[in-house]
Image (spheres, grey):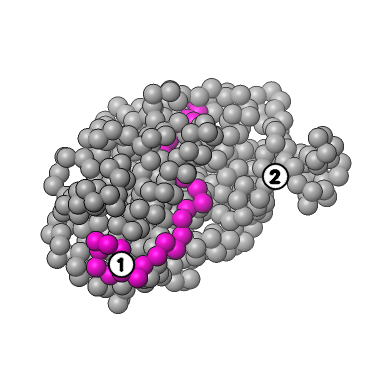
Amino acid sequence: MNKYDVIVVGGGTAGCAAAYTAGKLGLKTLLIEKNIHLGGTITSALVVPAMKSGEHQINTEFYQDLIQELHALGGQATYQNNPGWFNPELTKIALDNLMVKANVEVFFDTHIRDITIENKQVKAVIISKEMLSVYNDKIEIQNKSLLVSIETRYIIDATGNCEIGKLCGCEFLEKQEEQQPVSLRFMMGGVDVPHFAVWLKNYDNDRNVTTVEDINGFIHLSTAYTWDKDKKWALAPLFDDAVAKGILKDHDRNYFQIFTVAGMPSTIAFNCPRIIDYTETLQVANMSKALLLARRNIFRLANFCKEYFPGFENAYISNIADMLGIRVSRRIKGKYVYTIDDVKSGKTFENPVVVSNYPVDVHSDKRDKSTLHTVKDYTLPLESLMSADIDNLFVAGRCISADFMAQGALRVQASCFSMGEGVAKYIAKAF
């Protein structure tokens, strides 16, 4: 039977960084992904751009290689001094290319059915997939499906919801009242971006909110609005008018943010709608209702843009994310529980995996209750990515061992890249 040095479960931002790094360092690596492509939040959830997270980041080799690969494909741009403006569709191809270069074996459309544990260590993952019947010495028939056991020395849970930790019976930190609303992103094509950019730049003079740049003949822009009253939003009168006329519902305007997309000159990406009605991310019924509501919100927001934004007259919904943007869900109890005090104090550690200054960014389902606190550089220790219960289980991504507010600073893609890379480097040293 085949045996791996490392199995990474979850091919999103953290998982891809972990698998690529492990493969580059010579470890026999398997990456298991439930979807038919890699990328997670970037590709399935349309979360672009990757937000900049400071000038002193560590474990950034994977991120730099991804930037270079995407740039070669025409799917990357540097805007507002941030190289993380990615094309979601080309990211799928770029990640495939990187895994091939690193000799990482990838299983797509594959789900973990169970875990084999001995002496507080994961010995194997069990999947059901007829195509893998080559492992015939470990196949057994159960409920008329083929079960395949694949051994590993180390396992990295990058599933977001810490599904491997759940199968292992690990202890978790999440509390019922500690939740953030989810988002369902979408894109609109057919936008006259240069026309819209001229109007937008003249309409809003606040360059902390609205930016427009011509980068080698490609117009990039960004703007935002929320219903919170902590600042004066230039777009507020438009949203107020749309609600008054019934074009939007009041809750449609709780959060609105738009960007251009690298390599898509007539496309605008939306970081909204943010769904405030259903926040229990680990309950299927709640998230199903959130999806139904979100797609109705998207239709109204698209009509709003066509009505109020010059350049959107012929625009259309071109893509709706295949995955909800979930900010927080299950968090494992690790060997160290990272806290908001660690973030604020900038505490340093012996085994750092992340250095960032991304703000404490916690969304609320209530008006004027969201948190966005700027901070100085803070450091996440490796021990917050190590399970307290299973000796060879690591986590990377939003399911790390951190309290609710600290996780709100660490959940962004740049930090997830560093987590995955840092864990893989640590494991490689053990060989």
The reply to whether callout 1 and callout 2 are in contact (CB within 8 Å) is: no
**Residue density around tag 1, few if under 14, some if 14–19, many if 20 or more, within 10 Å:** many
What residue is shown at x 69% (from left), y 23% (from top)? 119
Q: Name the spot of residue 75 as percent of width and height, x first.
A: 44, 67
Question: Which residues, given as a range, are shown in magenta?
Answer: 306-333
Instruction: Specify the farthest residue to the right.
Output: 137
Q: Name the spot of residue 145 as percent of width and height, x first.
A: 80, 40
What residue is shown at x 30% (from left), y 67% (from top)? 312
Which mark is first along the chain, 2 or 1?
2
319 part of magenta stretch: yes
What is the chief secondary structure element of the magenta stretch?
Answer: loop
Element type at mark 2:
strand
Q: Nearer the viewer, residue 29 or 255?
A: 255
Q: Name the spot of residue 234 as percent of width and height, x first.
A: 16, 54
Q: Nearer the viewer, residue 247 or 381?
A: 247
Instruction: Indicate the amino acid at tag 2.
Output: Tyr
What residue is shown at x 15% (from left), y 59% (from top)? 204
* Disc number lying in front (1 or 2): 1
Query: Disc 1 marks which residue?
Result: 312
Q: Nearer the viewer, residue 282 or 262?
A: 282
Element type at mark 1:
loop
Q: Quadrant of residue 313?
A: bottom left
Looking at the figure, which quarter contains the C terminus? Answer: top right
Instruction: Indicate the amino acid at tag 1.
Output: Phe
144 part of magenta stretch: no
What residue is shown at x 71% (from left), y 25% (from top)? 118
Query: Disc 2 marks which residue?
Result: 4
Looking at the figure, which quarter contains the N terminus? Answer: top right
